Image: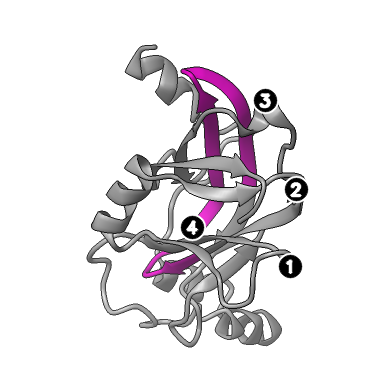
Amino acid sequence: MSAQHEDEELLPSSTPGYKPGAAKSVDEYAKLDAEDESLARWKASLGIVPGATSGANGPKVTVMSLELASSTLPAGKHLIMDLQNPAQIAELKKNPFTIKEGVEFNVRINFKVNHSIISGVRYLQVVKRSGITVDKMEQMLGSYGPHPKGEAYIKNFDPEESPSGMLARSGTYHVRSRVVDDDGEVYADWEWSFKIGKDW
């Protein structure tokens, strides 16, 4: 399969007729409607105040981690991908982790907005087995500005159930994940793999 086809699979869906507005800085948003006290208080609660960012250096968004959470995980076990650790990501691509069959789990993403306002941020995922696409997911994360306290945002995805049965347990699933916004700017793009097993 060509790299171009793989990239096409990771394009976010679009709404006909929707065009993202021109990008504005946090300072520009802060100065809009500055005479409206109520709006100014609301924007301040979101961290949108003049001079809130110390410059637009570096990436707008840093994707910190992706976690698979389940109440069925053994006590103390966590399935977390530290996306700031290239060695761990390389390891997860070669050595898949195991997801227990037939259990409910949800994905949780942790990211930080460093500067600017980002809109229409999505998490995209394509799952393949033996080179054939078996699942695609697009999860809207939303629109964000830098956190007022400089903290990361955490977004929990809808729960899903892992496949089960002998066929599901055979083979390795290869995943390509991407975080992208309305403007098509890619904030993270990585590959990993997993297997389905009888236990975690």
Q: CA distance from mark 3 to mark 1?
A: 24 Å
Depth-wise, is mark 4 or mark 3 nearer the camera? 3
Name the secondary structure under disc 3: helix
Do we see residue 121 in this rendering? no
Left or right, 36 with reference to 181: right
Q: Earlier in the sequence, mark 3 or mark 2?
A: 2
* Three-letter amino acid code at the position of disc 3: Leu
| Rendered image quadrant of residue 162 | top right
Decide whether the magenta segment is chiefly helix, strand or loop.
strand
Q: Which residue is mark 3?
A: 167
* Three-letter amino acid code at the position of disc 1: Ser
Q: Earlier in the sequence, mark 3 or mark 1?
A: 1
| Rendered image quadrant of residue 27 | bottom left
Do we see residue 52 in this rendering? yes
Q: Earlier in the sequence, mark 4 or mark 2?
A: 4
Instruction: State which region is magenta.
Output: 110-139
Q: Which residue is mark 4?
A: 118
Depth-wise, is mark 3 or mark 2 nearer the camera? 3
Residue count near mark 3 (Cα–Cα under 10 Å), binned few <14, some 14–19, many ≥20 = few
- 119 part of magenta stretch: yes
